[in-house]
Amino acid sequence: MTQKVDVLLGLQWGDEGKGKIVDVLTPRYDVVARFQGGPNAGHTLEFNGEKYVLRSIPSGIFQGDKINIIGNGVVLDPALFRAEAEALAKSGHDITKRLYISKKAHLILPTHRLLDAAYEAAKGDSKVGTTGKGIGPTYTDKISRNGLRVGDILENFEEKYQKAVARHCQILDSMNFEYNLQEAEAEWKEGVEFLKNFRMIDSEHLINGLLKNEKSVLAEGAQGTMLDIDFGSYPFVTSSNTVCAGTCTGLGVAPNRIGEVFGIFKAYCTRVGSGPFPTELFDATGEKICDLGHEFGSVTGRRRRCGWIDLVALKYAIMVNGVTQLIMMKSDVLDTFETIKACVAYRIDGKEVTEFPFEATDKIEPIYAELDGWKMDMTKVQSADEFPEEFNAYLAFLENELEVPITIVSVGPDREQTILLQK
Ligand code: GDP
Ligand code: IMO
Ligand code: MG
């Protein structure tokens, strides 16, 4: 029987811990595939005392001989890809034989990065706070049918490249944006040559063929639902569909081939970059979460904004993704709290609202439920039998509110600090 594709994706504003859990789940699968985003992602994995941050390479790369795929929905920067692959090779992980790249994935050009910076500068105070990796301009070129794809590097590439660069430079000049392209361009072109060491394929054929041969596939999301181009807090979002449906367009699998949808969330909330964040804390509690959770961006090093868990936003994310299993991360960060809050509704202009609104403005006042903290070091816990009563009560409260079972709990950054719950 043809297999299905399981999907793991973020339910908040990114950095939920997707990389760690994809790595943990990989032994159950034959294939791990990225379907959207690009090097704006920073997925952290920790095992055997080592720490790795992956940007474009799927997080299944460390588990044996699994097939890893960069799908057509991804945008790829050859220079950053080369740096990432070479760093892995240096640490003893040669990925050349285990990684396939879709010919249809779009290329991030050095001028896309410049355009990203120019558009952000032009927005002034209303800037998105992008990762500066050229994500928006690359997807813009894709949708406006001006993009260059990985497969293009195999024929007459220089001509196509120069045409795209000339168009980008015209825009940059019209914006009076000062730039120096030469250095970045040389590095980028070396990256393009490096890419040729990898298998560039029409990955939709490979994936569907594998599924037909009963191989199992895990699709790895990047960013999070609240950063989705359609359903996130627009315009403070990324430029791809981070939701489950993005798997279909980003890998070429039909909607009826989707199996389990793992929705991953932190026991609290973070956001990096600008945009609305209803439960954001500006006080000592927010600082405490940030410090204990080491909440600094893995790509840009920026301090992440922190707040309490937002069940209004989480329910919305569960709805648009069809989440079948929940994974709760970083609960250990709340180990010392007397009281833990969870936002169960918003008050907007005096009215109580439980549906995520069109625009999450400053007018939103979160309404909180308060739960007792468990006040115990959870980082050494090995099984659910050791969970304190208050922790079980917190899990039961969340499951009751969210109406989806929590099947994995993470109590630390290491691969081993993961508790699978029997349901
Ligand atoms: P991703 O982008 O969703 O893969 O997440 P990031 O890697 O950007 O951010 C998650 C951060 O939390 C990383 O530094 C992880 O090592 C760390 N982390 C993951 N799970 C846990 C956990 O359960 N507890 C703690 N304390 N840290 C965790
Ligand atoms: P992972 O996969 C957190 C945010 C940026 C910015 C907005 C748009 O590690 O969870 P972009 O560069 O995509 O145009 O920026 O999206 N952002 C992320 N925030 N985690 C990420 O990825 C992110 N990727 C983009 O901070 O607000
Ligand atoms: Mg991240």
Image (cartoon, rainbow, N blue to C red):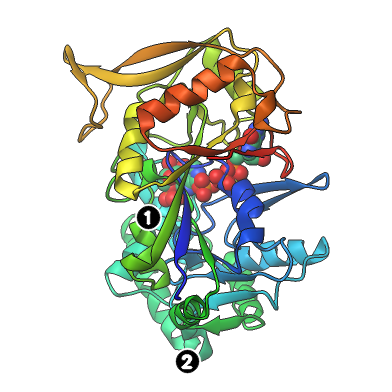
Instruction: Examine the image and state in which quarter residue 310 appears.
Output: top left
Give the crowd class for mark 2: few <14, some 14-19, many >=20 residues within 10 Å.
few
Does residue 384 appear left or right of residue 211 in this picture?
right
User: At x 44% / y 67%, what residue is drawn?
Assistant: 4
According to the picture, the residue beneath numbered tag 1 turns out to be 244
**Secondary structure beneath label 1:** loop
**Secondary structure beneath label 2:** loop
**Earlier-in-chain disc, 2 versus 1:** 2
Does residue 255 appear left or right of residue 375 in this picture?
left
Please indicate, yes or no, whether residue 10 appears anywhere in the rendered image: yes
169 up-or-down from 330: above or below: below
Foreground residue, 29 or 267? Answer: 29
Q: Gap between marks 2 and 1, in whole Å?
A: 36 Å
Residue type for callout 2: Asn
Mark 1 vs ligand 2: CB below 8 Å: no
374 up-or-down from 356: above or below: above
**Percent coordinates x, y for residue 275 in the rendering:** 36, 33
Q: Nearer the viewer, mark 2 or mark 1?
A: 1
**Percent coordinates x, y for residue 411 in the rendering:** 66, 31
According to the picture, the residue beneath numbered tag 2 turns out to be 156
Does residue 241 appear left or right of residue 71 in this picture?
left
**Percent coordinates x, y for residue 345 in the rendering:** 29, 20
Name the quadrant of the N terminus.
bottom left
User: At x 39% / y 50%, what residue is drawn?
Assistant: 238
Residue type for callout 1: Cys
Q: Are marks 2 and 1 in contact (CB under 8 Å)?
A: no
Foreground residue, 257 or 199? Answer: 257
Instruction: Examine the image and state in which quarter residue 363 appears.
Output: top left
